[in-house]
Image: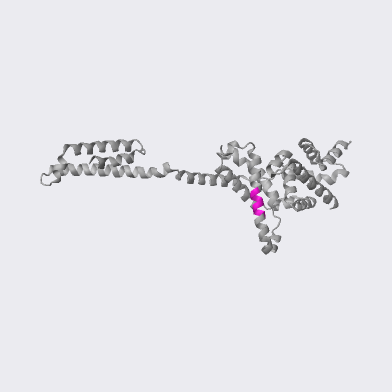
Amino acid sequence: MNYQYIEQLIERYFSCQTTLQEEQILRSFFVGEDVPGHLMQYAELFRYENEAKQESLGSDFDEKMIALIDGSEKKTKTLQPQRRFTPFFRAAAVVAIVITVGSAADRAISSQSETSAESAIAVDPYIRQSDIQNTIRVKDVSQAEVKPQVDTLLVQPTEMN
Amino acid sequence: MDFTRDILPLKNVLFRTALRITMNREEAEDIVQDTLLKLWERHEELSSVSNLESFAISAARNLALDRIALHQNKVITLNEELHDTADSSVSVHEQLVMGERTDMLHQLISQLPEKQRTALHLRDIEGKTYREIGEIMDISESDVKINIYRGRDFLKKNFKNL
């Protein structure tokens, strides 16, 4: 067999004149078993290049990476203002309901007793009506998954009083 | 952009390149991890990158070079300790499989200056064009060729003499 082509390629390889394709031909040639004696000195190099390409990281690395990415994902999400404030809005809504319902009940009770001076205010139809309206509105909001409007609603009872 | 689909598959080329630079498996794995995390942090900007793989290799190489610089500072004080653990780029299993001559070739490659070693690696193991290697290493195409030429020449001369 004539190895002139391979010899030429080797020469051009060492003077940086081979194409990527020709370099692949060399690697494939040296992987084969029938390498003649005078070319054996190069076999190790091209076989090494072939084998080095197999070097890789296992699936345990993938699992570690995905766990790290998932972890950092959760961290960045909690830092988003909308999400961070959601519990606050929920709590505010609950507090608003308790206060409105509580004060409405309080006034209803005190309006029944005619002795205190507050009863005059409590009986006032305007205040009672607004209380009832607020109760209904806050309840609506709490059912509709709490939006930022809640805090403007929270201000309203004092404005109306 | 999806992490598992677009970024994670770069792990092996990054690992091999980092390993070639640091000659240390653990360190190379750390570098791959750091590089992938950084890429993912910036994944929204990456859609404008024309060649993600080259970009990633370049980032990994810079991290590897930083680590090497850090070691070189330590070498002054910890010379002996580092010398003992110098080359851990070959796993125990590979050492058993590898022939004596392959081991010597490996030693020769580790003696090359980093630029020659990386350029040679990107060409002969990763199959990159001169242009791509130039982009990754931030040098001109002719500098890439010079580095590869010198690297191959060194291996040829020294391997013959073994």
Residues in magenta? B62-68
Whether B55 is among the magenta residues is: no
In the foreground, A10 or B132: B132
Give the x, y percent position of residue A110.
15, 44
The quadrant of the image that shows the N terminus of chain B is: top right
* Residue A100 appears left or right of B142: left
Extreme-left residue of the structure: A115
Identify the residue shown where x is 76% and y is 37%.
Answer: A20
The colour scheme used here is: one colour
Asked whether the viewer can see residue B54, the reply is: yes
* Residue A15 appears left or right of A143: right
Whether B63 is among the magenta residues is: yes
Give the x, y percent position of residue B59.
63, 45
Give the x, y percent position of residue B90.
71, 52
Dominant SS in magenta: helix
Give the x, y percent position of residue A37.
88, 44
Identify the residue shown where x is 57% and y is 47%.
Answer: A64
- Number of marks in the rendered image: 0
* Residue B116 appears left or right of A4: left
Asked whether the viewer can see residue B28, the reply is: no
Residue B146: name its quadrant: top right
In the foreground, A120 or B98: A120
Give the vertical position of A89 relative to B72 (above or below).
Answer: above
